[in-house]
Image (spheres, helix red, strand yellow):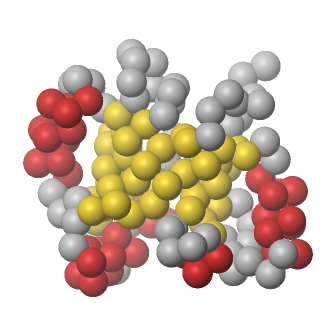
């Protein structure tokens, strides 16, 4: 098990380059991990606390690559700001099953692969007290 609860906090931004400039200064990390998630139509910049990507709790900037992106819709409705928090789980399939049994509303009924190559799934904010929650299963390095 990963000895941390928060994987990362997701922040919706209109302009990724502008966001990177600001968060490079805020976090002291000048070289965020940048990637694109085509199925979500987003470009992502991930700020890790250390040199190694994907380690420690991170800040994820999300910018839409299309007006069809869920992030574009979020920005239209709410503007820039906090989009989701991501919580580590040991076994994502098991957790989704437990949540389903509890009556929680799941956005992803089965996990998909997130920006960093781990299994992730989103829970509807109505089932997590108004916060969009992403679950992430840390891949085993063994
Ligand atoms: Zn995320």
Q: Is residue 77 left or right of residue 138?
A: left
Q: Nearer the viewer, residue 100 or 138?
A: 100
Name which residue lies at 70% across and 60% down.
111
Left or right of residue 100: residue 49: left
Q: Quadrant of the C terminus?
A: top right
Q: Residue furthest front?
A: 129
Query: In front here: 129 or 125?
Result: 129
Instruction: Classify residue 24 by image quadrant.
Output: top left
Residue at 21% in and 73% down: 79
Viewer can see residue 90:
yes
| Position of residue 116 in the picture relative to residue 15 (left or right) | right
What x and y, as percent, mark residue 89? 73, 46
Q: Quadrant of residue 40?
A: bottom left
| Residue 113 position within the rendered picture, expressed as x and y whole percent measured from the top left | 61, 52
Q: Residue at x 50, y 68 (%)?
A: 131
Q: Quadrant of the N terminus?
A: top right
Instruction: Pinpoint residue 70: horizontal percent, then vertical percent.
Output: 39, 75
Rendered residue at 11%/48% (across/down): 18
81 above or below 72? above
Taking 29 as reference, is 42 above or below it? below
Residue 36 visible here: no
Closer to the camera, 133 or 54? 133
For residue 131, above or below residue 77: above
Whole-percent x, y for residue 139 in the image: 70, 35
């Amino acid at each position: 098990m990963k000895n941390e609860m928060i994987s990362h906090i997701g922040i919706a931004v209109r302009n990724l380059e502008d966001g990177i400039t600001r968060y490079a200064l805020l976090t002291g990390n000048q070289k965020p991990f940048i990637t694109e998630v085509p199925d979500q139509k987003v470009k992502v910049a991930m700020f890790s606390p250390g040199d190694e990507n994907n380690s420690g709790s991170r800040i994820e900037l999300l910018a839409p690559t299309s007006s069809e992106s869920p992030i574009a819709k979020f920005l239209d409705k709410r503007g820039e700001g906090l989009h989701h928090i991501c919580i580590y789980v040991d076994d994502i399939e098991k957790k989704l099953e437990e949540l389903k049994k509890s009556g929680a509303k799941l956005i992803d009924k089965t996990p998909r692969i997130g920006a960093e190559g781990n299994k992730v799934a989103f829970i509807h904010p109505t089932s997590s007290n108004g916060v969009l929650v992403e679950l992430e299963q840390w891949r085993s390095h063994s």
